[in-house]
C-alpha cells in the first residue's frame, strides 16, 4: 500500500514535470511556471486528470495547449489516459490601477480610430460578442457621443432599466450594453465638451450596474485627441485597440494613439485593419482597392501587435443593419472568422499585459543629444551603436515613407552627412522620438524597429 502511494506520488510529480514542456506562446513561459496547472492527480489505473486554468477563455491557442498537455501526460510511464479540462480566470489590471468606480470590471479596453466611418463601432460590437462567445463576461460601453450607433447594430430598441439608484445595462447577444444613444434623443445635435464627457463617463461607470465583467469594451468617439483622452482619464484603462483602414495613414493614427494612451500609462494593445480588402459578394474575387499592408507596416515599425485584418464585405454591413453582429449571424463567414481571431489576439494581449510578461527588450539608456552616433543600452544587456544619419534615413514617419506603397520618399541627398540628434524622448514602453539637427522630429522609432535596424532580434 505504502509503495503504491509512493508510486502514485512519483508519477504525479513526473506528470507535473512533463507539463513543463507545454509553452504558452503568448506569455513565453511554460504552463507550470505560469501557475496554470490546477488539481493534477493520477489514479491507480493510470488515469491522469488535470485542470489548466488559462488567463482568458478566448485564448487563441486553447486547443493546442490542451492537445499538448494530453500528449505530455500520456508520455509519462504508467499514465494510460489523460483527461485535461480547460478553464479560465481573467486576471485584472493590477490592483492599484483599478478604479473604485468599477471594482468588478477586470479590464477596460477602449477602441479608438483616427476618424469616423472606419468601422470602429462595428468592430467594437463584434469584438465584444466574440469574446462572450468564447465564454468571457463582457460589457460594451458606447461612448461615441457623436454617433451612438451601437443600439441599432445590436438591434436594441428598449431603454435600460433603473431602480432609482442604479442603471441596469441592456443585455443582448450575451453582452451588457450601455450607450449614450439610450439617453440622448435621436437627431438631437449634442455638443459635448470635455467636462460634460468626463461627467458622462463617471456616471456611466459609477451608476451603471455592470456586475462582474472580464472585459468592458469602450467604443470611443472618432479621433485621438483631448476629448478621447478626457473620456479615458476617469477610468483605469488596461490598453487600447486602434482601428484603421488602408486609406488611413495608419502609422499616424497609431502614433497619435500611442502618445495619447501613454499619458494614461496604458499601452496600445494592437491594431486591427478594417476594410482590408474588398471581397465581392457575387464572385468572391478579392481586391486590395486602397492598397494593403499600411497597418501591418505601422504595427511592425511601432512594435505593436497586429490583431487582425477584416475584409470589406457587404455581409458585415448587412448584419449590423439587421441588428445581429456577423460573428453571431454568420459565424463561418471569413470576416466573422477574422473578427473572432482578432478578439482572441486581443484577449491574449490583455493577458500578457496583466501578467507583466511583456519581456521584450526595451531601451534602458540612450546617449543621443548632440551626437552623430547614437548608443542605446537595452534591458537585455545588449548595446547598439547607430549612425544618427542612418537612423534619420530610416525614419518610418508618413512624411518619409509612402504608407500605401511602402516606398521611401525621403531622398538621402537631402540629409546632411553631419546630421546629429538634438534630443531624444522616450514614448511609453515602445518607442523613442528623436529631434534631428535637420529639424525633423515626427518619427516614432519603435524599440523593435530600432533593434531590427541594428541587426538584433
Ligand atoms: P465608425 O464607428 O468608425 O464611425 P461604423 O462601425 O459605424 O464606423 O461603420 C461605418 C459603416 O461601415 C457602417 O455602415 C458599417 O456597417 C460599415 N462597415 C464597417 N466595417 C465594414 C466592413 N469591414 N465591410 C463592410 N462594411 C463595413
Image (cartoon, rainbow, N blue to C red):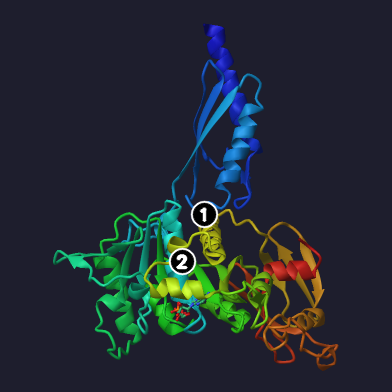
Element assignment for label 2: helix
Q: Is residue 163 shown above or below 196?
A: above
The crowding category of the residue bearing disc 2, from other C-alpha atoms within 10 Å (few below 14, some 14 to 19, many at least 20), is many
Residue 394, quarter of picture: bottom right
Give the residue pinned by disc 2.
326
- Which residue corresponds to the image point at 43% horizontal and 79% vertical from the top-left? 228
Q: Is residue 128 visible?
A: yes
Give the residue pinned by disc 1.
351
- Which residue corresponds to the image point at 81% horizontal and 79% vertical from the top-left? 390
Q: Is residue 93 visible?
A: no
Mark 2 or 1 closer to N-term? 2
State yes or no: Cβ of the residue under disc 2 lies below 8 Å from any atom of ligand 1: no
Q: Quadrant of the C terminus?
A: bottom right
Between disc 2 and disc 1, the foreground one is: 2
- Which residue corresponds to the image point at 24% horizontal and 78% vertical from the top-left? 183
Toward the left, the furthest residue is 164
Residue 414 spot, x, y in % from top left: 81, 93
Element assignment for label 1: helix
Q: Is residue 399 shown above or below 334?
A: below
Q: Who is closer to the viewer here, 50 or 381?
A: 50
In-image side of 21 versus 270 (left or right):
right
Q: Who is closer to the viewer here, 388 or 359?
A: 359
Q: Is residue 41 shown above or below 145?
A: above
Q: Who is closer to the viewer here, 245 or 422?
A: 245
Residue 162, quarter of picture: bottom left
Q: What is the number of the mark on residue 82?
A: none
Amino acid at each position: 500500500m505504502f509503495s503504491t502511494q509512493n508510486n502514485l506520488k512519483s508519477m504525479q510529480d513526473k506528470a507535473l514535470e512533463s507539463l513543463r514542456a507545454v509553452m504558452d506562446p503568448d506569455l513565453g513561459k511554460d504552463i507550470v511556471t505560469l501557475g496554470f496547472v490546477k488539481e493534477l492527480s493520477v489514479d491507480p489505473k493510470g488515469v491522469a486528470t488535470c485542470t489548466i486554468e488559462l488567463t482568458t477563455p478566448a485564448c487563441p491557442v486553447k486547443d493546442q495547449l490542451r492537445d499538448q498537455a494530453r500528449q505530455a501526460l500520456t508520455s509519462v510511464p504508467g499514465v494510460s489516459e489523460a483527461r485535461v479540462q480547460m478553464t479560465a480566470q481573467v486576471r485584472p489590471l493590477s490592483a492599484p490601477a483599478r478604479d473604485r468606480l468599477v471594482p468588478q470590471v477586470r479590464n477596460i479596453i477602449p477602441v479608438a480610430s483616427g476618424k469616423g466611418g472606419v468601422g470602429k463601432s462595428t468592430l467594437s460590437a463584434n469584438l465584444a460578442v466574440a469574446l462572450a462567445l468564447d465564454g468571457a463576461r463582457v460589457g460594451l460601453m458606447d461612448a461615441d457621443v457623436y454617433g451612438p450607433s451601437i443600439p441599432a447594430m445590436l438591434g436594441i430598441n428598449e431603454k435600460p432599466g433603473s431602480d432609482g439608484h442604479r442603471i441596469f445595462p441592456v443585455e443582448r447577444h450575451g453582452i451588457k450594453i450601455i450607450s449614450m444613444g439610450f439617453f440622448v434623443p435621436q437627431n438631437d445635435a449634442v455638443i459635448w465638451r470635455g467636462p460634460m464627457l468626463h461627467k458622462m463617463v463617471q456616471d456611466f461607470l459609477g451608476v451603471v450596474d455592470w456586475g462582474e465583467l472580464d472585459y468592458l469594451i469602450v467604443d470611443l468617439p472618432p479621433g485621438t485627441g483631448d476629448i478621447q483622452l478626457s473620456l479615458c482619464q476617469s477610468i483605469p484603462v488596461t490598453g487600447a485597440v486602434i482601428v484603421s483602414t488602408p486609406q488611413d495613414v495608419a502609422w499616424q493614427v497609431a502614433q497619435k494613439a500611442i502618445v495619447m494612451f501613454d499619458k494614461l500609462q496604458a499601452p496600445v494593445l494592437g491594431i486591427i485593419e478594417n476594410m482590408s480588402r474588398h471581397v465581392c459578394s457575387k464572385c468572391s474575387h478579392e481586391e486590395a482597392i486602397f492598397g494593403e499592408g499600411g497597418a501591418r507596416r505601422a504595427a511592425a515599425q511601432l512594435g505593436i501587435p497586429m490583431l487582425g485584418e477584416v475584409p470589406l464585405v457587404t455581409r458585415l454591413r448587412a448584419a449590423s443593419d439587421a441588428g445581429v453582429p456577423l460573428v453571431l449571424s454568420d459565424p463561418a463567414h471569413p470576416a466573422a472568422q477574422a473578427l473572432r481571431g482578432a478578439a482572441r489576439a486581443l484577449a491574449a494581449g490583455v493577458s500578457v499585459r496583466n501578467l507583466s510578461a511583456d519581456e521584450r527588450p526595451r531601451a534602458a539608456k540612450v546617449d543621443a543629444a548632440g551626437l552623430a552616433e547614437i548608443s542605446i543600452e537595452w534591458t537585455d544587456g545588449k548595446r547598439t551603436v547607430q549612425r544618427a544619419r542612418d537612423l534619420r534615413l530610416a525614419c518610418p514617419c508618413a512624411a518619409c515613407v509612402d504608407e500605401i506603397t511602402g516606398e521611401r520618399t525621403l531622398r538621402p541627398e537631402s540629409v546632411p552627412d553631419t546630421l546629429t540628434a538634438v534630443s531624444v524622448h522616450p514614448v511609453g514602453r515602445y518607442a523613442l522620438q528623436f529631434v534631428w539637427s535637420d529639424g525633423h522630429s515626427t518619427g516614432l522609432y519603435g524599440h523593435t524597429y530600432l533593434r531590427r535596424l541594428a541587426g538584433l532580434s
